[in-house]
Amino acid sequence: MLLLVGVPWLFLKTVQNTIAEPYSIGVATVTEWTLHVQETGQPTPALISLVPSSSLVSQLFQQVFHRTMESLMTPSEPGMPVVLQEEFLAGLQDVFLPNEILAVARTVGLEQAQFNPVCMAVKREPSGGRTRQLFFVVFETPAFNEFRQELAKLYKERGGVLLFDPAALELVLPVASSDADFAGWWPLEVDRVVDCRAPIT
């Protein structure tokens, strides 16, 4: 009986240890980003996102899959949200058109910024008797903070009165999920102490 109880625990521990090993990505894959505007009302969290090179998400997904050996899905449209549709509809739309926000992002050089991967992170939550999972990479770049701060300043200068918090959004790239509802994870609250599971090299 002890053996039967111990085997699942040992398997889970092995998976956890494997997930915690460093993930590797090619340097070139994090230097190619393109800003993309999504039509409002679409089933995606982002109004504006940074779309990576075609190989970045696939590289990371294969590493996640080989470590977990679970049935996982990749985003149909990979990208890092930099402005959420929710933020646009909640107030930004009062003073900006989507293309005007895009212009601000390009002016601060968001597409040319150096993006530093912080970690591979995992979110888990119960759902209908099972556990949903989201694997994502947390990134950092001063240009992202500069863009959000500039957007907040312009919003206020143009007469925006509702709350827009430039610090409310983390820069994250979804990699894999246990189901196709990637949008259902947003707004995504990132706790780096709890969620970060492995470094990126």
Image (cartoon, rainbow, N blue to C red):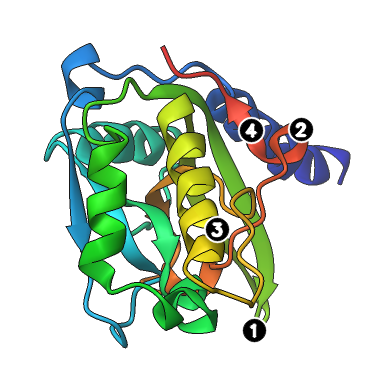
Work out whether residue 105 or residue 43 is closer to the camera in this orientation and state it.
105
Q: Quadrant of residue 156?
A: bottom right
Q: Residue at x 57, y 52 (%)?
A: 169
Which residue does the numbered mark 4 point to in the structure image?
196
Q: Is residue 56 left or right of residue 192?
A: left
Label 3 – label 1 distance at C-alpha: 13 Å
What SS does tag 1 mark?
Answer: loop
- Residues marked 2 and 4 touching at CB (< 8 Å): yes
Nearest-to-viewer mark from 2 and 3:
2
Q: Which mark is residue 153?
A: none
Percent x, y for residue 102? Answer: 25, 56
Q: Which residue matches tag 2?
A: 193
Q: Residue at x 11, y 40 (%)?
A: 54
Q: Is residue 200 left or right of residue 109?
A: right
Q: Is residue 115 above or below residue 70?
A: above
Closer to the camera: disc 4 or disc 3?
A: 4
Tag 1 residue: 128
- The amino acid pointed to by label 1 is Gly
